[in-house]
Amino acid sequence: MGNGDSLDILLKERLLINIKIISHILEGIMSYSKKVCILFICIITSFTIGCSIQNEEQSLIKSTYFEDVDKIIIYKGSAYKQVQDLKSFKKVLKDIEGKKVNIENLSRDETEDRYKIIFTYESSDQERKISFKGNNMLYDDNWYSIDKNIDEIYNKIDFEEKIDSNLQKSKVKREARKNFKMKDSLLGNWIYDDETYIEFTKKHIIYKTKQKDRKFNYKINRIDDNKIFITAYRDILFSNDKDIFKIEILIDDTKNNIILKKKMLKSEMGYKNNLIYIDYIDDKKVELGSFDDLFFVENKDI
């Protein structure tokens, strides 16, 4: 083999080596590009998901209000409209922004056209409510100053406005109770926000649940301004342990809303609950009190 042939073989070997080196370099570049591309896609995806989650968190009204929702009805005083386009209305509500407002800045004056949105659900008897007082919204036991006009939201609902005649009639009963004496205003049915009832007769306190009713005798110990102090007991002969619990009731000026504090006498257990007065018109339950009344917010720490 001559020197020329040896040189050609050497050049070919070096060429193959260089081709392999270049091939490895290109593979590395492509692999790096893929990794960069994948990383970039992950970053974009994470950012998008993060923004979505952040927007969800920033939304004042939680998504749980809209899960399995069956009907949404918005009341304006005794008038109301039922929302037909739930998807669009959900977007309107979720776009509401607001900040907590000091209740001292809210007026206690009655608003003629008080707005309330009621959510009902397909698989539950539970209702959720959002109330409005001017440009303020009561949501999850907090008042917020909001950036939306509830009048505009109501007026844009493309549905015939109807009148709830029972709500109109209830106004008369609600107003009449303001003139009741304290002990007389206690008589009748009150409801907790979990749909449990308590009835005061002249002699008995009756707790009404879905399972059973429990009845106790009671006596009014004293009445101080807007407070009623009560002792409940069982009428059992030859018993020294008749007294079971004491009740302190704070009642508002309308006599339709109360805060009830109960203290068990044989233990350290105590309870505090908000209740509103209910009546019946044409055999239909009507709430004369309202859980969105400022009375409950102003006295939540008593």
Image (cartoon, grey):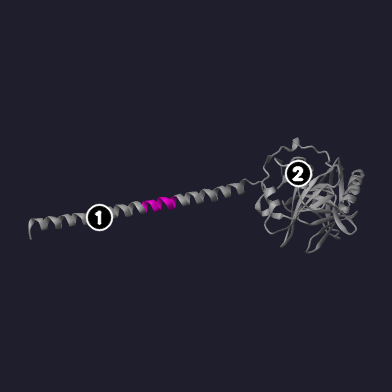
Q: Does the magenta stretch include residue 174?
A: no
Residue 208 numbered mark, or none: none
Q: How far apart are marks 2 and 1 (CA)?
A: 73 Å
Region in magenta: 31-39
| Residue type pointed to by label 2 | Glu
Please state the horizontal and vertical placement of residue 281, each as a whole percent of the image.
Answer: 90, 56
Give the residue at mark 2. Answer: 152
Callout 1: SS:
helix
Callout 2: SS:
helix
- Asked if residue 269 lies left or right of residue 199, the reply is left
Give the residue at mark 1. Answer: 19
- Asked if residue 287 lies left or right of residue 35, the reply is right
- Bin the neighbour count of mark 1 within 10 Å (Cα to Cα): few under 14, some 14-19, many 20 and up: few
Please state the horizontal and vertical placement of residue 51, each as a whole percent of the image.
Answer: 56, 47
The image quarter containing residue 149 is top right
Please name the residue shown 72% across and 61% down the image: 122
Q: Is residue 36 magenta?
A: yes
Q: In this orientation, which residue lies closer to the viewer: 280 or 225?
A: 280
| Residue type pointed to by label 1 | Ile
The image quarter containing residue 137 is top right
The image quarter containing residue 294 is top right
Please name the residue shown 82% across and 62% down the image: 213
Q: Which residue lies furthest to the left in this view?
A: 2
